[in-house]
Image (spheres, rainbow, N blue to C red):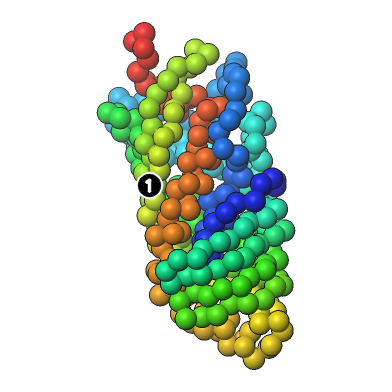
Amino acid sequence: MKLSRPVSVAPVWRMLLLAIWCCCCLLPSTVTGKTAFDTSKPEFIRTCRFTDPQFVECSTDSVQGLFDKLVTGIEGLEHVGTIDPMKISKIRILQGDGPVSVNASLSKVVVTGFASTKVIRNVVSSKDYGWETHIRLPKMRLEGSYHMQGRILVIPLNGHGKCWFEPSGMDIIMRTTTSLYERDGHVFYNVTATKVDYTISGLRLHMGNLFEGVKVLEDSTNQYLNDNWRPVSEALKPIIAKTIEDILLAIMQNIFHQLPADYFVADLPRQSG
C-alpha cells in the first residue's frame, strides 16, 4: 500500500518509528457512510464481554486477531491494505530545535517484519471504555532512499543515497482515550487521544553516500551511530513518542469508525439500554 501524502516528521529515528506505526498506512479519519460490515461480524474478530472472568485474555486475542488479519488485508475496510510488506511513498523530515537539526526526506520506503508482531495484553476499561495495549515487535527492517542535511547531537549528516534501519525488541505500551456513539444499529468507538511509551533493545542502520561519497567519513559516521544508538535514541525519545501517538490516533480513528466496537465488546452500553 502507499501513503499518498508526505508526512512532516523529525529526525532519522523519528522517521524510523513513524514507519513502524504507519503500519496500517491509513489516512486521517474522514470515512463516511455505513460500517464496512453491515450484515455480520467478521470471523477474525473474537467478541468479548466485561462480565466474562477471562475478559482480558479474550480482548487480547481479539486484538491479535485484528492485527493478524491486517497482515493479509481486510476486504471491505477502506484505506487498509496489507502491512507486511508495507510501502510508503515519501516521508519528509524537518527538525530545527534542540540537539537535533535535520532537513531530509525518505522515499520509496519498504518496511517488513510486522507479520511477527505480538499483542501481549489488551485491557479495556468498563468505566470510560478506553484501553491499554502492550505490543511487541521482535524485528523490522526499513529500506529506502534518503536526502539529508543537518546534525544529530554532535554528529553531522550530509548526503543522499540508499539506507536501511533495523530496530529490534520494540516493546510498546499504548493508552487510548475514547468515548462511545451509536450508528446504524451499532456502538462505535470515538477515539480521541493516545499516549505512548516504548523501549527498544537494539538498532542497526546504514546510510550510504554520506558526505557526498567521502568513504572514510561515511564509514566512521555509520559505525559511530551503530555503536552509540542507545544515547542518541534516548535523546530523541520525546519526539519519537509524539510521532507514534499522532500516527496511532489517525489509524485507530479510521479503523474504529468502520468496525463497530460491539463486535469486540458485546456488552458496551447503549443509549436505549
Residue ID at (38%, 32%)? 178
Residue 42 visible in this rendered orientation of the protein:
no
Badge 1 amino acid? Lys
Image quadrant occupied by the C terminus = top left
- In the picture shown, does residue 216 fall above or below 87? below
SS at circle 1? strand
x, y percentage for residue 143? 67, 64
Outermost left residue? 127
What residue is drawn where x is 56% and y is 37%?
28
Query: Residue 139: x, y in percent?
Result: 54, 62
Q: Is residue 218 left or right of residue 50?
A: right
Q: As rendered, which of 151 and 69 lies closer to the eye?
A: 151
69 vs 178, left or right, is right
Circle 1: is it few (<14), some (14-19), or many (20+) Cα within 10 Å?
A: some
Query: Residue 200 location, x and y as percent?
Result: 44, 64
Q: Residue at horizontal 63%, vertical 48%?
A: 83
Q: Which residue position is annotated with label 1? A: 195
Quarter assignment of residue 212: bottom right
